[in-house]
Amino acid sequence: MVIRRVVVYVALSLLGATAVRAQSSAHAVSFGPAATSARESTAQKDARMQWWRDAQFGMFIHWGAYSVPAGVYHGERTDGIGEWIMSHSKVPIPEYEQFVHAFNPTKYDADAWVRAAKDAGMKYIILTSKHHDGFALFDSKVSSYDMVDAAPYHRDALKALADAAHRQGMRFGVYYSIMDWHHPDAQGPNAPEYNSRTWHNPNFARYVETYMKPQLKELLTQYPNIDVLWFDGEWVADWSDEQGRALYDWLHTIKPSLIINNRVGHSRQGLQGMSANHDAPGDFGTPEQNVPATGLPGVDWETCMTMNDTWGYKKFDDDWKDTKTLVRTLIDAASKGGNFLLNVGPTSDGVIPAESVARLHEIGEWMRVNGQSIYATTASPYGAPAWGRYTVARNEIFAQVFDWPKNRRLVLTGVTSKPSDAYLLADRKPLTIEQTSEGYVVLLPAVAPSSISSVIAFHAGDMTGSLPSEPVGRMKE
Ligand code: H79
């Protein structure tokens, strides 16, 4: 299969190949004030983050009124991402409201969505509770611009998914946009320049106090299993790190166990996604559409990515990444200590596109054999070998072999002490290890068990590695 897409890598800094994720108190660096404040010790933060760090792989769901135009406005196809059609196509608010009035997902089956995520081996789901367009998928008492009041469906779509996730043992969280293109006290009056980064609304504080915070409180009280708040749209001129910190602290007074992304603040560095300084609020960084070049010592992060080129459904976007690319991106993130949040954009009928469901199922086929090398992993202490990646969990090392050596000799680049118990996850049969002048070499069978990544597990006494500090390698195109 040809991998079509050049994954954009952002050179963060030469942090070194021995980077580890924030897993133990020895490595935890403050990423938000609560971690080191009197409110929460490092050990308490580790406990709060534990399930999320172990989960590794989640489903992002972008669903809203933008799935009705599905990328086409007045017969014109938008070049941009589907959920941004209101901004890119300069749709006036009253016209956009017609999409809401037409949003009737009669085929919506929340249990089927959760099954599709589970089938892929995902452990959590993040649903857009309200995107930049301001339309809410849940039953909000402070707004009539929601699924129950304004859409013909008249049912709480978020509650259905939260309940289905709970029934099926899946963690659940919600996306929430601080920017709001519909609200008169937020970006609404600047139509159609909804996305200005310089325009101010003198009433923005009223939007925050009487609309946004009440909606967030509704989310945390009406839906007891919301464990993550995933903010976005924080770049508006009326938002700041200070407001983000206050919001972060306030949310924790409502729900102490909540995990909150760094877009609650205002100092994210574009799509690279990490905050500019360590004082910024939030529990994890959010690289968007890219995996960092290296691990980030002591910092939690999660790469979010689309399967095609849009988050919200576009009927003509068929630029799908193949399963191999998606699994290798998950492996790449895990090898650097990060989570992977893979997006689906359901239709206005309530259906996850078949192309997405098929890929989720194929990812699951790989995960059912090799998931042990993904869940609860920490960053590779050995950097990235030429043939693939290393992931590490519970003192076990996993060689993720993308390129199976034709001479059947896998050099364990970077491994400095004698490995033991090497075996392929695919068949669990013991493999021979030789010590050579090149380093330790695993003798392989002739045929790779997987064209995506064949995984060899082994133990090594010394996990410190020997590679020089260089970025963990890039994915091959
Ligand atoms: O919800 C999805 C998208 O709609 C939203 N984030 C994902 C998770 C998003 N993706 N891309 N964009 C929004 C484009 C935004 C670009 C910019 Fe900016 C906003 C350019 C300038 C302001 C982001 C923030 C990049 C720099 C600052």
Image: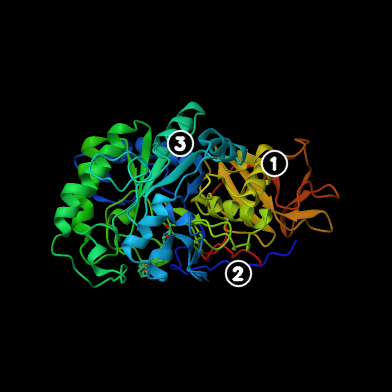
Task: Give the residue number, with chain letter if any, for mark 1.
Answer: 365
Q: Quadrant of residue 83?
A: bottom left
Which residue is at a point 78% across and 36% down the rendered structure image?
Answer: 429
Disc 1 crowd, CA 10 A, few/some/many (<14, 14-19, 20+): some
Question: Which amino acid does the dot numbered 3 rest on?
Answer: Leu
Question: Which amino acid does the dot numbered 2 rest on?
Answer: Val
Which residue is at a point 40% across and 34% down the rendered structure image?
Answer: 159
Please tell me which of labels 3 and 1 falls first in the chain: 3
Question: Which amino acid does the dot numbered 1 rest on?
Answer: Glu
Which residue is at a point 15% across and 56% down the rendered structure image?
Answer: 205
Please tell me which of labels 2 and 1 falls first in the chain: 2
Task: Give the residue number, with chain letter if any, for mark 3.
Answer: 161
Q: In which quarter of the image is residue 120?
A: top right
Q: Position of residue 96 (x, y in %)?
A: 37, 60
Q: Distance between the residues labelled 3 and 1?
A: 24 Å
Image disc number at residue 454: none
Cβ atoms under marks 3 and 1 closer than 8 Å: no
Q: Is mark 3 on a helix, strand or loop?
A: helix
Please tell me which of labels 2 and 3 falls first in the chain: 2
